[in-house]
Image: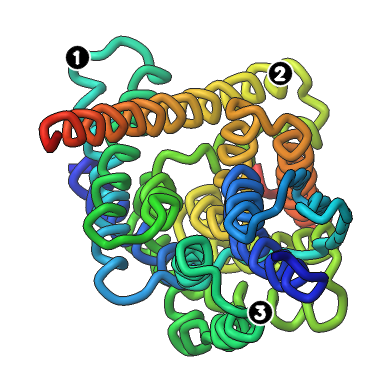
Amino acid sequence: MVTKELLSYILDIGELMLVNGAEVNRVEDSISRICKAYDAKRVDVFTITSSIVVSIQLKSGNTLTQTRRILSYSTDLDKLDRLNNLSHYVCSHTPEAEYIRNEIEKIRIRRKYGSVVQYLVYGMIAGTFTIFYGGDWNDAIVSAAIGMILKLAITFIQRVDKNVFFVNILCSFVVGMLGFLLVRIGIGHSFEKIAIGNIMLLIPGLALTNSIRDIISGDTIAGLLRLFEAILVALSISFGFGLVSVFVGGMLK
Amino acid sequence: MIHTYQIITAFMGSLGFSILFNIKGRKLGYAAFGGMLAWLIYLLGGLWLSGEMTQYFISSIIVTFYSEICARIEKTPATTFLTAAIIPLVPGRALYYTMSYAIDGKFGEFAEYGSYTVSIAVAIAAGIMVASSLFRVFLALRSYDYRHHSM
C-alpha cells in the first residue's frame, strides 16, 4: 500500500539517482518497479533531466501525484551504486517507509574523495590528456599545474555564482591566460596541447555521448535537453578561450 | 611510441575521471582498465578497419561488454564502469574545435567539425546501445535455457 509519505521517499530515491548520474530510463524504471512492488494498480512516471512526475492509481481507487524539480547534478557513481542496491532491496522486501528514509539518509551523507585528492586528480587528468593528444613532458607538467589551479578557480567561482555558462567562461579564460603566459615564458612548448588537456576537464564530451544515448533509447526530450546543455557548455568554454585571444591581441595563433 | 603513451595515459585519464566520479575501492581498477581497453581496441581497430567511425563503434561495443561483465562480477550497474571507461573515446577535443570555429566565424570548418563530432558521439552511443541490447538478449537466453534444463 503506497502512502503519501512512502511515495515521497520513492521519489527521493529517483531524484538522487538522477542527480548522481543515472540515465532517465533507469530512474523511470526503478520508480515504477518500486511502486508496483507496493501494489499500485497503475504507475505513470515521466522523467526529464530537470523534473520527475509520478502519478499512481491505488487499488482503493485513489490517485497520488507528486513531482520533483531537479536543479543541478553532479555525477557520483558510488551513491548511484548504493541507490541501485536500495531500490532492488525495496522491490523484493517492501520494507516500512521509515526504513527507506533511514537508508536514504545514510546514502546522502556518503562522502566524496578529500580535497587534496581532488586537486591532485585534476592535475593528473590535465597532464595525462596533454600527453594523450601528443604534448611533450614540459607541456604535461605545465598542464598539470594549470589543472590544479583550474580546480581552485572552479571552487572559488562556484561560491560566487553557480551559473554554468558563467563558471565555464571564467574557468576557460583562466586556463587560456595561464597557458598563454607559461608558453610565452618558455616553460611550456605548445599552447594548444596544454589547453586541450585542461579542456578535457571542462568539456561535456561525456554529456554529449550520453544525450545521444538517451535519444537512441527513446527518451527524446531528455536527450535533446542534455544535448543543448552540452552545446551551451562547449560554446561557453570556447567563448572563454576567445576572450583570451582578444586580450592578448591575436598572438595565440 | 605515441601509441604506447596513449594507452598508458588512457588508463590514467580514466582512473582520474573515476576518482572524480567517486568510484571506490576495487571498482576503480576495473574502470581504469576499461579506459585503457577502449583506446587499445580503437588503435588495434585502425589496423584492419576502414573508417574512424567503425573504430569508435567497435571499441564502444567491446567496452560495453566489458562493463556489463564487470558489473555482474561486482554487482553494480554497468554505468559505473562504462562512464569512466568511455572517457578516452569521447569527442572532447572535436567538440571544442567545433565551437571555437563557430566563435571565430569560420562556418565552413564549423559545419565540417560539427558533423565530425556528432558522428563520433553517434558511433559511440550506437555501439553502447547495440552491445547492451545484445547482452540483455544473451542474459534472457541463458535464463530461458536454465529454466528449461532445471525442469
- Identify the disc placed on residue B111: 2
| x, y percent for residue B23 | 40, 70
Q: Residue at x 24, y 23 (%)?
A: B45
x, y percent for residue A147 = 53, 70
Task: Report the mark closest to the observer, 1 or 2.
Answer: 1
Viewed as shown, does residue A202 lie left or right of A6? left
- The residue singled out by tag 3 in the image is A97
Residue A9 in percent (x, y) is at 71, 73
Residue A112 place in picture, x, y as percent: 51, 82
* Residue A227 seen: yes
Image quadrant assignment for residue B109: top right
Q: Nearer the viewer, mark 3 or mark 1?
A: 3
| Helix, strand or loop at mark 1 | helix
Q: Which mark is residue A3?
A: none
Cα distance in 3D space between marks 1 and 2: 29 Å
Q: Nearer the viewer, residue B32 or A170?
A: B32
Which residue type does callout 2 highlight?
Ala
Rendered residue at 47%/83% (across/down):
A113
Q: Secondary structure at mark 2?
A: helix
**Distance of label 3 from label 1 (alpha carbons):** 57 Å
Please tell me which residue lies in front, A12 or A116: A12
Q: Quadrant of residue A180?
A: bottom right
Dot 1 falls on which chain?
A: B
Chain under label 2?
B
Which residue corresponds to mark 1? B48
Dot 3 surroundings within 10 Å: few (below 14), some, or many (20 or more)? Answer: some
Q: Which quarter shows the C terminus of chain A?
A: top right
- Foreground mark, 2 or 3, reads 3
Q: Dot 2 surroundings within 10 Å: few (below 14), some, or many (20 or more)?
A: some
Q: Amino acid at mark 3?
A: Ala
